[in-house]
Image (cartoon, coloured by chain):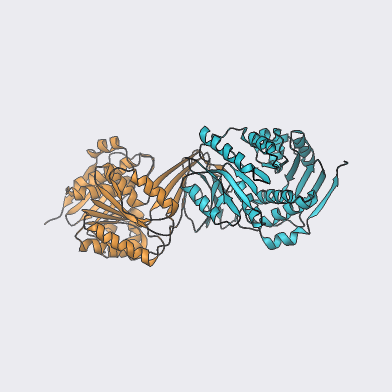
Chain colours: A cyan, B orange
């Protein structure tokens, strides 16, 4: 199975309101709830592709129960979340039906105790023994040490499980130094990590910092990949309008899926770019439009060069 | 015991954000959760005054469980909520820490099925047999007939239990026609009911529509009461700055408390006005500052006249 780790799981709530006007009262016309947090989105895309996926991270409180109930209803996803005392956070996306704009409110997440963090690390090492790949995704909840991902990367490497890291800021900086197999920063995360706004230079720098391969997701410019095997760019044929939330998570799912199927890099990148583009047409993160995905897959332009052996 | 009915119970969530900017992403710095809905607020104030209170209405889903857990921890309040399939709604108050302004997002509430509505009516009639007074509070969730309060008022009168109605719009218009003992509209609700923005005239009109007594809550102008026994105004000595949410619910609790203790109208009104003013100093609805309440109680100016027998 493929393992995804979401330390800061969430219940993603979307509210539709006729028009958002600060400092007034609004009747919400439509409420939707989905399991959230990057690793859970990645898992749902992987499951839809036919992979067996196990999700871990933390779950707590009434919101955690709702997340777990919905995961139980997702074919192909096994719930191995570790219970904690604090409640799983909510994120609220308020969609203004008039303009289509979204206002986001993100709770900080429960404070994880040292005992809970230890329990997670033990569960994670057990899960690694049956994993073909692992993705470490998203932000850290309060209480988890900022060097957490570095430790989790090292444990995966010790277990000889390929590890992909998708996070930001200091957690990414520390995690990269532990030498993950792949990191998938977006343009902002890459610039914050390296200090450079020039994608190629920044991607090279990120590899020097420890990542074996770097796949930068550059929005409409597609994916830029630098790996020991070569460098490539994968660009979807058209930029699609829709909901960009979760496009990066769909790309991560594509990369992992291609990795465990031992596809060559150009095919992995085509899959990741097509999934990412197709996810933009889905109303919520963690889903994608299958027709669009299949149609785009053959039309992603992958260019690049293989490294001299 | 005093019975309070909240057909559209809620989990009231308050988010503190540094500054609310539409169409951007916000990190919530503080999250608080409280049982909500007018009748639950009334119950918490009554319990704090030393009364035994039973709350009924509907509860469902994970949010309903959180509401019930918090009620169980409230001394003096007995939970007689009726379970339903749909989840109890959330209300979200986003407090801008910079300006202090609040932006409110209210979910519509679960759709109540005809069978659930029948089950509630049965439970309500059972509870009336041991009630000394009943308050019917707040909006109706989807699925409950708009004439619901009229039926509940008639059932209370048939059981010879004094009944106070605190709602708005069409639910109030229909409920008043069933001749409740007291209604407690605010200025807007009273104007909507009667078409008049002149409080005395509107209060007289509301009595003609069926209410035995009308206590209008007029914000800083205090309370205006018209009853068969006479007419009074109760004005607190100073207008307090703070959170006005729940001030009306505190007034309802004061009126019911005075009713079951058989206090004369001027004493009931002094209690209601003092509680209402003191609740403004509490950070959340359903609570009040006891020191302020006790201090204000003797300083509320009640003026009026008793009707000729």
Q: Position of residue B280 (x, y in %)?
A: 35, 41
A152 or B186: nearer the viewer: A152
x%, y% of residue B266? Answer: 19, 47
The residue that appears at 32% across and 61% down in the rendered structure is B120
* x and y percentages locating residue B78 in the rendered image: 29, 49
Kindly identify the residue that appears in the image at 36 percent across and 39 percent down. B282
Q: Is residue A185 left or right of residue B299?
A: right
A133 vs B207, nearest the viewer: A133
Q: Is residue B210 visible?
A: no
Residue at the outermost right position? A308
Q: Is B268 left or right of B64, judged from the image as shown?
A: left
Q: Is residue B179 above or below residue A230?
A: below
Q: Is residue A56 visible?
A: yes
Q: How many marks?
A: 0
The foreground one among B307 and B167 is B167
Relative side of A158 to A65, left or right:
right
Q: Quadrant of residue B296?
A: top left
Q: Position of residue A147 (x, y in %)?
A: 62, 32
Give the quarter of the figure containing the C terminus of chain B: bottom left
Relative side of A269 to B186, left or right = right
Question: Image quadrant of residue B202?
Answer: bottom left
Viewer-proximal residue among B134 and A258: A258
Give the farthest residue toward the left: B309
């Amino acid at each position: 199975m493929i393992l995804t780790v979401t330390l800061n799981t969430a219940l993603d709530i979307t509210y539709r309101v006729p028009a958002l006007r600060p400092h007034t009262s609004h009747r919400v016309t439509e409420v939707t709830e989905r399991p959230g947090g990057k690793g859970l989105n990645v898992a749902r895309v992987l499951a839809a592709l036919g992979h067996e996926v196990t999700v871990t991270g933390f779950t707590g409180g009434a919101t955690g129960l709702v997340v777990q109930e919905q995961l139980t209803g997702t074919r192909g996803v096994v719930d191995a979340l570790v219970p904690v005392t604090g409640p799983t956070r909510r994120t609220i996306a308020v969609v203004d039906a008039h303009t289509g704009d979204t206002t986001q409110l993100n709770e900080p997440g429960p404070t994880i105790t040292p005992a809970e963090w230890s329990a997670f690390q033990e569960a994670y090492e057990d899960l690694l023994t049956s994993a073909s790949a692992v993705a470490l995704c998203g932000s850290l909840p309060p209480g988890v040490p900022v060097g957490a991902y570095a430790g989790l990367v090292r444990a995966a490497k010790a277990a000889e499980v390929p590890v992909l890291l998708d996070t930001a800021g200091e957690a990414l900086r520390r995690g990269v130094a532990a030498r993950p197999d792949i990191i998938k920063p977006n343009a902002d995360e890459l610039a914050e990590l390296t200090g450079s706004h020039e994608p190629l230079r920044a991607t090279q720098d990120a590899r020097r910092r420890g990542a074996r391969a770097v796949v930068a997701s550059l929005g409409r410019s597609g994916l830029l990949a630098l790996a020991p095997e070569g460098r490539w760019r994968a660009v979807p044929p058209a930029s699609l309008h829709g909901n960009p939330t979760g496009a990066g998570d769909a790309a991560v799912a594509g990369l992992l899926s291609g990795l465990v199927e031992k596809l060559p890099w150009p095919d992995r990148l085509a899959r990741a770019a097509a999934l990412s583009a197709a996810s933009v047409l889905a109303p919520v993160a963690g889903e994608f439009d299958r027709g669009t995905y299949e149609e785009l897959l053959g039309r992603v332009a992958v260019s690049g060069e293989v490294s001299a052996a």
